């Protein structure tokens, strides 16, 4: 159950207006929003029979929850991400997990969750050229204009690390009519359009297939998973949704307070009598082969 995290840089970075609170946003993602995707992660791992001995490479691993879930199944996981703040949280999580009783140690007696601080995808290669059994991209696409652009280069670099016929899992938002959160995300599109800053767009049916085709992958099955977004209160919901990055363009086009206010207003239909927020959603995954 060896765990490794690798930093992967892209040319694009967060704009100054959004980057000022990156630490807070990363923490909100890890503590509030990331867990909303647990049913999606579980469904993918169950479908692919991720278990002891599986060598898994997670692209866009974020703060590491999906890696922890695979590691708990006995998989040997490697995570790659371009976000410094999220990667730091993932490192801490995996190091703590490695110290639990019964967990294996890495080279030199270091915790097996120890991180390799590198910006080269080549550092994700397993010793001896052993190929990965599974590649995952579990951060859903199909919500912000251009949100799949960074996935292409990551796949191009990752695919050579896998053997022929290896499953590659891509994930995305389901149809807007099946996602209650789509109504809230439209706030991002409306505000961002004032300066044409790339806000929300509805998920398209073939988003995942197009990404797979560009990467030279062959589709081999798909599925849909219910992932309701549930929050303790409206404040937590606003913080969690802002942490997704969907509203970055809206913040640049207006200001954070305005965006927070309009998100809160859009959440009103989903606030229950006890003050909690509940929004049913459906996400989609595509299994493609190298």
Image (spheres, rainbow, N blue to C red):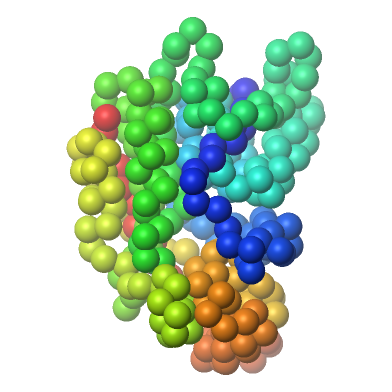
Q: Nearer the viewer, residue 225 or 260?
A: 260
Q: Is residue 196 above or below residue 88?
A: below
Q: Nearer the viewer, residue 53 or 25?
A: 25
Q: Residue 276: x, y in percent?
A: 65, 81
Q: Nearer the viewer, residue 112 or 277?
A: 112
Q: Is residue 280 above or below residue 87?
A: below
Q: Is residue 205 above or below residue 59?
A: below
Q: Quadrant of the C terminus?
A: top left
Residue drawn at x 52%, y 57% is 37
All told, the count of numbered labels is 0
Horizontally, is 175 left or right of 183 in the view?
A: left
Q: Residue 22: x, y in percent?
A: 69, 59
Residue drawn at x 75%, y 40% is 92
Q: Residue 132: x, y in percent?
A: 43, 23
The answer, for residue 233, to whether it is visible in the render is no
The answer, for residue 120, to whether it is visible in the render is yes
Query: Residue 178 sits in which quadrant?
Result: bottom left
Horizontally, is 114 left or right of 255 in the view?
A: right
Q: Residue 168: x, y in percent?
A: 34, 37
Q: Is residue 208 above or below residue 193?
A: above
Query: Residue 162 sits in which quadrant?
Result: top left
The residue furthest top is: 128
Q: Quadrant of the N terminus?
A: top right
Residue drawn at x 40%, y 22% is 161
Residue drawn at x 76%, y 11% is 108
């Amino acid at each position: 159950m060896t765990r490794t995290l690798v930093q992967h840089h892209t040319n694009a970075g967060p704009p100054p207006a959004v980057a000022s609170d990156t630490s807070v946003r990363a923490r909100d993602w890890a503590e509030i929003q990331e867990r909303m995707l647990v049913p999606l992660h579980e469904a993918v791992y169950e479908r692919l029979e991720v278990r002891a001995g599986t060598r898994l490479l997670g692209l866009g691993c974020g703060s590491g929850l999906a890696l922890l879930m695979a590691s708990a199944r006995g998989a040997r996981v490697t995570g790659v991400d371009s976000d410094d703040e999220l990667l730091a949280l993932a490192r801490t999580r995996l190091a703590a997990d490695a110290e639990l009783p019964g967990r294996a140690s890495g080279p030199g007696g270091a915790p097996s969750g120890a991180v390799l601080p590198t910006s080269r995808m080549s550092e994700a290669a397993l010793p001896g050229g052993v190929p990965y059994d599974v590649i995952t991209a579990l951060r859903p696409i199909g919500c912000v204009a251009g949100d799949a652009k960074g996935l292409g280069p990551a796949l191009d670099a990752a695919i050579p690390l896998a053997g022929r016929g290896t499953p590659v899992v891509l994930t995305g938002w389901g149809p807007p009519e099946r996602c209650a959160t789509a109504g809230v995300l439209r706030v991002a599109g409306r505000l961002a359009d004032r300066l044409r800053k790339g806000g929300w767009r509805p998920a398209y049916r073939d988003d995942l297939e197009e990404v797979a085709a560009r990467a030279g992958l062959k589709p081999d099955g798909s599925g849909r998973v219910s992932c309701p977004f549930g929050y303790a209160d409206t404040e937590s919901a606003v913080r969690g949704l802002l942490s997704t990055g969907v509203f970055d363009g809206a913040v640049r086009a207006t200001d954070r307070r305005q965006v927070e206010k309009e998100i809160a207003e859009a959440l009103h239909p989903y606030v229950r009598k006890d003050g909690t927020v509940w929004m049913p959603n459906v996400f989609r995954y595509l299994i493609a082969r190298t």
